[in-house]
């Protein structure tokens, strides 16, 4: 159970223990936390005692569901207390409460991310990596602040010459011999929020300074798969019935477009086995029946149930080795049979409704609840095709010292919109088979990935953001771009849970007879990690919505790279009209023009501020703010 007001939230702790001994020990654990006078030391000690490394050495630990549930519940409580929650007893029952008025919003976010970051920096693999990079010369790409100020006074904005470099594979820096990926990773560890690699498409970018020795790093950025569901973004793009209707002048055009889209979607589904099994007939593609739709839904559920009990199929789908003829075999797996039946049922259901509900009065169309729901489902089909193809999230973006004092973060934010990035994205992914689409169709599917939209979120809900006021006006570089505020996120996530706690949840799911087995196979469904967390919290009797709602809402930004991005993302156009394209300029020249505009708009003002230049000078070879700050190394900390 949980209850909340606008500023206080409370969780009643009611874990499901079958043993009275574990229930008694849990109450003792809660009493100790509630009564201690030194909560930080107590929590730190208990957390050290419950590290995964220690627990895995205990006999039969991973196979004992009850004990795993007990330990995982305690770890969640410790994580939440580390985030500022307090353990309280009400009517002799333990619970956790949090007041969101106890800290400022920024302090709250910083403390939460610091907890996760410090846990990461204590890992031996991370410490070894950082030490190796510092031994092997990472300092050579950190610009000396004193030298930078001297160059700025002598050469003006020409003292900084930014360019883009993509960190891919095993490519190395020509100035230091270090792997570009390692350089990117090292500086990512200087961020407030912890670094976690994510699956799927990704672009990692270094912004370098050709005017400095060894071409120092100005900042880093990365693009990753966009989140599937984000209401304010989806409404802004127009993935809804209202936008769909508004794109057509008359009902017949709308119906024709929907019918063509449904046909194209069906053509991308492997159907041979479904036809042979009598799950549908060719005539029913054009005139679907309720009986056929129900049969397809039933077949989808049965195939999914069988997949969850098929470890050999999970192993096969996890394999990255695919021959030219392997896509048909993948399509026939239980997982993809379930997905194919479900999608065909959805498409036929949409067609059936559009045939039955006559659209005669265009003005009353959206007042028809059934039609409105159906058109929203139609747009979700279109969204599924484009969300992983034509848009990406900016997952990392910012400058490192000393360039951060000169608003280098705004430079990096502008440069991720460069045609160079669009070109690199297209070259990297145009020759790759799309895993899910190929597995659905039973043959290799390659599409031309036109990147038309970037979205991102601020770190804080209020206060300054490096994305504020970023705009390249019309005429500076093509038609210009602008970071637009779209709204706020809902504040759900997992960053406030430690890595060990998340791993314990995975172990618990592995021992439990759960309602939905989650195998972390690409294509199995959205956010397998989040589904595992929800399942584990449910087993522990903890309210997942409350635990996962960290209340740290963020500002959502969108930046359109093409003037017709909405038409591309809603399926009404295929060729993007890019904003930052100018006759006679190649992609590299466009990057240079963007950097020149940044210098004129932001750098020149900072150069005239003596207080700013004093901050830049602080970053010397012996004490530099771009160095990774280890947990125990306070001497390297810069509060920048």
Image: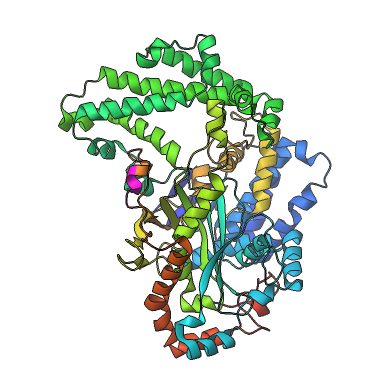
Looking at the picture, how far across and down is residue 402, in whole percent? 55, 79
Q: Is residue 201 above or below residue 335?
A: below
Q: Is residue 240 above or below residue 156?
A: above
Taking the spot 60% from the left edge, 21% from the top edge, the residue there is: 332
Looking at the picture, how far across and down is residue 268, in whole percent? 47, 27
Q: Is residue 293 magenta?
A: no
On the rendered structure, is 423 left or right of 238? right
Tell me the quarter of the picture where residue 629 sits: bottom right
Comparing 626 with 319, the one in front is 319
Q: Quick check: can you spot residue 103?
A: no
Q: What is the span of residues highlighted in magenta in the rendered image? A: 563-567
On the rendered structure, is 323 left or right of 437? right
- The chief SS type of the magenta part is helix
Comparing 614 with 533, the one in front is 614
Q: Is residue 134 above or below residue 351?
A: below
Q: Is residue 513 above or below residue 59?
A: above
Residue found farthest to the front: 584
């Amino acid at each position: 159970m949980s209850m909340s007001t606008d500023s206080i939230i409370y969780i009643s702790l009611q874990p499901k223990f079958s043993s009275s001994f574990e229930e008694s020990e849990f109450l003792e654990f809660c009493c100790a936390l509630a009564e201690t006078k030194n909560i930080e030391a107590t929590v730190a000690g208990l957390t050290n005692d419950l590290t995964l490394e220690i627990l895995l050495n205990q006999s039969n630990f991973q196979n004992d569901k009850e004990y795993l549930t007990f330990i995982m519940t305690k770890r969640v409580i410790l994580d939440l207390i580390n985030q500022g929650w307090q353990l309280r007893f009400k009517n002799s029952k333990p619970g956790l409460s949090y007041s969101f008025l106890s800290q400022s919003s920024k302090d709250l976010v910083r403390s939460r991310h610091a907890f996760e970051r410090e846990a990461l920096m204590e890992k031996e693999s991370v410490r070894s990596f950082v030490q190796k990079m510092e031994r092997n010369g990472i300092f050579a790409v950190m610009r000396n602040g004193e030298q930078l100020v001297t160059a700025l006074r002598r050469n003006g904005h020409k003292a900084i010459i930014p360019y883009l470099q993509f960190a891919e594979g095993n490519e190395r820096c020509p100035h230091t011999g270090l792997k570009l990926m390692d350089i990117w990773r090292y500086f990512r560890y200087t961020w407030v929020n912890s670094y976690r690699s994510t699956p799927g498409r990704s672009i990692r970018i270094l912004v370098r300074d050709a005017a400095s020795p060894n071409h120092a790093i100005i900042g880093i950025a990365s693009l990753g798969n966009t989140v599937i569901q984000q209401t304010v973004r989806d409404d802004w793009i127009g993935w809804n019935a209202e936008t769909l209707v508004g794109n057509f002048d008359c009902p017949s055009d709308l119906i024709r477009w929907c019918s063509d889209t449904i046909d194209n979607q069906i053509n991308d589904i492997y159907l041979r086995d479904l036809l042979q099994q009598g799950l549908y007939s060719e005539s029913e593609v054009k005139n679907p029946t309720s009986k056929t739709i129900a049969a397809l839904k039933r077949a989808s559920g049965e195939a999914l149930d069988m997949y969850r009990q098929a470890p050999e199929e999970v192993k096969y789908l996890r394999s990255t080795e695919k021959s030219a003829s392997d896509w048909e075999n993948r399509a026939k797996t239980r997982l993809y049979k379930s997905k194919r039946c479900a999608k065909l049922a959805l498409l036929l259901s949409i067609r059936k409704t559009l045939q039955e509900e006559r659209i005669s009065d265009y003005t009353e169309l959206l007042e028809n609840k059934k039609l409105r729901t159906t058109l929203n489902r139609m747009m979700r089909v279109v969204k599924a095709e484009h969300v992983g193809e034509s848009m990406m999230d900016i997952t990392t973006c910012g400058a490192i010292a000393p360039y951060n004092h000169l608003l280098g973060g705004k430079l990096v934010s502008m440069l991720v919109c460069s045609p160079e990035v669009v070109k690199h994205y297209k070259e990297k992914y145009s020759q790759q088979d799309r895993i899910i689409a190929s597995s659905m169709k039973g043959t290799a599917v390659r599409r031309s990935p036109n990147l038309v939209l970037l979205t991102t979120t601020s770190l804080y809900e209020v206060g300054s953001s490096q994305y504020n006021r970023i705009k390249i006006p019309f005429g500076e570089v093509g038609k210009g771009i602008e970071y637009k505020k779209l709204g706020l996120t809902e504040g759900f996530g997992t960053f406030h849970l430690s890595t060990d706690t998340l791993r314990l949840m995975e172990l618990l799911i592995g021992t439990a007879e759960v309602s939905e087995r989650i195998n972390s196979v690409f294509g199995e469904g959205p956010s397998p990690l989040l589904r595992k967390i929800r399942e584990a919290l449910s087993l522990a009797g903890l309210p997942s919505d409350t635990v996962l709602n960290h209340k740290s809402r963020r500002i959502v930004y969108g930046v359109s790279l093409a003037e017709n991005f909405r038409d591309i993302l809603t399926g009404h156009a295929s060729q993007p009209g890019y904003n930052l394209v100018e006759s006679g300029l190649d992609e590299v020249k466009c990057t240079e023009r963007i950097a020149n505009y940044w210098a004129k708009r932001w750098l020149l003002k900072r150069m005239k501020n003596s207080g700013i230049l004093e901050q830049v000078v602080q970053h010397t070879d012996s004490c530099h703010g771009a160095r990774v700050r280890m947990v125990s190394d306070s001497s390297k900390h810069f509060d920048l």
